[in-house]
Amino acid sequence: MTAIFTVPDMTCGHCEKTVRGALAEALPGAVVAIDLTAKTVAIEGDAAKAEEAIREAGYSPERAAV
């Protein structure tokens, strides 16, 4: 299942790299798609773990309605 989050405080390439790294650590092998312009993160896998990983990286994810 794909989980989509809006991450309003993800503003630059460094932010994207940080979020991508946190997700790779929490959900190894998961497919992650980040759209920095739209400030969205889509991930295949456990949505709760993904949200927790993004928060622990210092960002404020909001689950997007699908």
Image (spheres, rainbow, N blue to C red):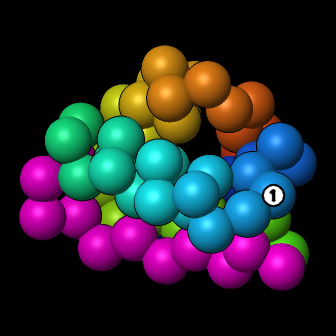
Question: Which residue shows up at 20% across the image and 41% down it?
Answer: 25
User: 26 and 66: which one is in front?
Assistant: 26
Residue type, numbered disc 1: Thr
Query: x and y percent of residue 52 in the render?
Result: 47, 24
Q: Is residue 49 above or below residue 38?
A: above
Query: x and y percent of residue 34 in the render?
Result: 58, 73
Q: Name the residue that disc number 1 marks.
A: 11
Tell which residue pokes out farthest to the front in this image.
14
Residue 21 counted in the magenta span: no
Question: Which residue shows up at 23% across the image and 64% down it?
Answer: 30
Q: Residue 43 occupies which quadrant of the picture?
A: bottom left
Q: Residue 55 occupies which quadrant of the picture?
A: top right
Please, what is the dominant secondary structure of the magenta stretch?
loop
Query: x and y percent of residue 62 in the render?
Result: 77, 39
Tell which residue pokes out farthest to the left in this image.
29
Q: Is residue 18 above or below residue 13?
A: above
Q: Is residue 41 left or right of residue 6?
A: left
User: 65 and 55: which one is in front?
Assistant: 55
Question: Which residue shows up at 49% across the image and 77% down it?
Answer: 33
Q: Is residue 35 above or below residue 44?
A: below
Q: Is residue 20 left or right of residue 61?
A: left
User: 65 and 13: which one is in front?
Assistant: 13
Question: Which residue shows up at 49% across the image and 49% down it?
Answer: 19
**Residue 56 can be seen, yes or no:** yes
Query: x and y percent of residue 18 in the render?
Result: 47, 48
User: Magenta span covers which residues?
Assistant: 27-37
The C terminus lies in quadrant: bottom right
**Residue 66 can be seen, yes or no:** no
Q: Secondary structure at mark 1?
A: loop
Residue 32 counted in the magenta span: yes
The N terminus lies in quadrant: bottom left
| Crowding at mark 1 (Cα within 10 Å: few <14, some 14-19, many 20+) | few
